[in-house]
Amino acid sequence: MASAKDFSNLKYISLITFRKTGVPVPTPVWLLEDGGLIYVRTDPRSGKAKRLRRIQRVRIAPSDARGRTLGSYVEANARFLEGEDARRIFLLIKRKYGTMGALVDLFNGLRGNHPTAVIEIKLA
């Protein structure tokens, strides 16, 4: 059985969220493992955020930057993190991805995307 620690050294995971119809939608995302949980950030207006507000069940798998999986998917549950906990995780993610993260944030900002929401993922 997989644990969150198995994901701690990865740069990317494929995160599957589900449409109302049950159709899975995979998305490659950055991640942070902290305290036995996995965290990702996203724009609160993104498709994955909207899908997650309806259905909190997700699947995750190791992946490359393009979302090609490098291992098996595992079942998990996700929720949005709020307040000081979200700010702390957001800063840890920024630290993990350093200069590359800053460049991506710059380009996201120019496109009007603002990854300010933090999602907490707990493996099932």
Image: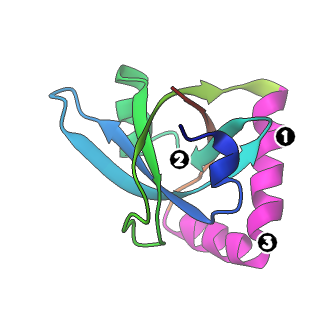
Residue type indicated by callout 1: Arg
Q: Label 2: which residue?
A: 43
Above or below, 9 against 117 in this view is below
Above or below, 62 against 65 in this view is above
In the rendered structure, does residue 27 fall within the stretch colored magenta? Answer: no
User: What residue appears at the point 51 percent right and 26 percent down from the top-left corner?
Assistant: 124
Looking at the rendering, the stretch of residues picked out in magenta corresponds to 84-111
Residue 30 occupies quadrant: bottom right
Real-space Cα distance between discs 1 and 3?
A: 15 Å
User: What residue appears at the point 19 percent right and 30 percent down from the top-left corner?
Assistant: 22
Residue type indicated by callout 2: Asp
Tag 1–tag 3 contact (CB < 8 Å): no
Labels 1 and 3: the sequence-earlier one? 1
Camera-side residue of 26 and 98: 26
Is 50 left or right of 34, judged from the image as shown? left
Real-space Cα distance between discs 3 and 2?
A: 19 Å
Labels 2 and 1: the sequence-earlier one? 2
Above or below, 119 against 40 in this view is above
Mark 1 residue element? helix
Circle number at residue 69: none
